[in-house]
Image (spheres, rainbow, N blue to C red):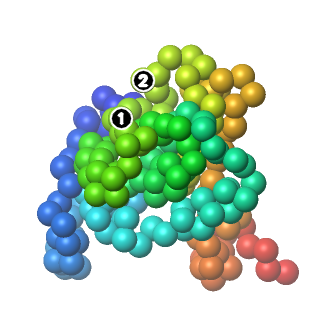
Amino acid sequence: MGYSQEKLENDGYLIKAAPVEDWRRYNELHPVPFYFDFDWLSARHPDLYHRFALSTVGLMLELDKLVDLSGLDIIDVGAGTGRSAIAAARRARSIRAVDIFESVVLYGINQVRQIGLNNVSYVRGDQDNLPFTNNSFDALINSWSELSYSEAYRVLNSGGYLIRMGAPLEALCGELTSTLADVYPNLIKSNRA
């Protein structure tokens, strides 16, 4: 399901990040609506997301063994708080990190600034309408977010790398997959016999 920038804003997703550590004051009796919606949570609390969403680090370490990103111009679609962009920046010539949430983009810009990276720039944009010309990038990274394949191929150079990272549908919940498969059989396929 793709969201346009206009639809997100109309649905209330044009939200500012909460103050850092604000998530610690969560009240179970009076939760914020949609608190457990992942996108809303990461957009409202990018500091919490960045602190605990560490799986991208491992994925990028494995990617480094498979693909040489040295000297490439890369777009990171659904870049979030920057874990994949920051990891790729060690070798890449340039990284354009794209995310639809303003709060996440601002958080990512701050992360890149704190680390002192000069080859990573953030852009607020929609995966269905990337703000770049055709054939602009040597590689596209997409980690744990939605991706429009037509847009991905449009902005990639001929022969460029399309790198999609995340869990396969049958392992959507990581270590909890086998436990949750009995409760959500239509959503999660278990590998158990």
Give percent across and percent down for residue 27.
Answer: 18, 78
- In terms of image quadrants, where is residue 152? top right
**Which amino acid type is shown beneath numbered disc 1?**
Val
Q: Residue furthest right?
A: 193
Quick one: SS at disc 2? Answer: loop
Q: Residue at x 43, y 41 (%)?
A: 119
User: Which quadrant holds the C terminus?
Assistant: bottom right
**Which amino acid type is shown beneath numbered disc 2?**
Pro
Mark 2 in CB contact with mark 1 (< 8 angstroms)? yes
Residue 131 tag number:
2
Residue 168 tag number:
none
- In terms of image quadrants, where is residue 22? bottom left
For marks 2 and 1, the one nearer the N-term is 1
Q: Measured along the vertical axis of the image, is residue 17 above or below residue 157?
A: below
Give percent across and percent down for residue 183.
Answer: 60, 77
Q: Residues within 10 Å of mark 2 (few under 14, many from 20)?
A: some
Give percent across and percent down for residue 102.
Answer: 27, 43
Provide the residue designation for mark 1. 123
Q: Residues within 10 Å of mark 1 (few under 14, many from 20)?
A: many
Residue 84 in view (yes/no)? no
User: Residue 41 versus residue 140: which sits nearer the camera?
Assistant: 140
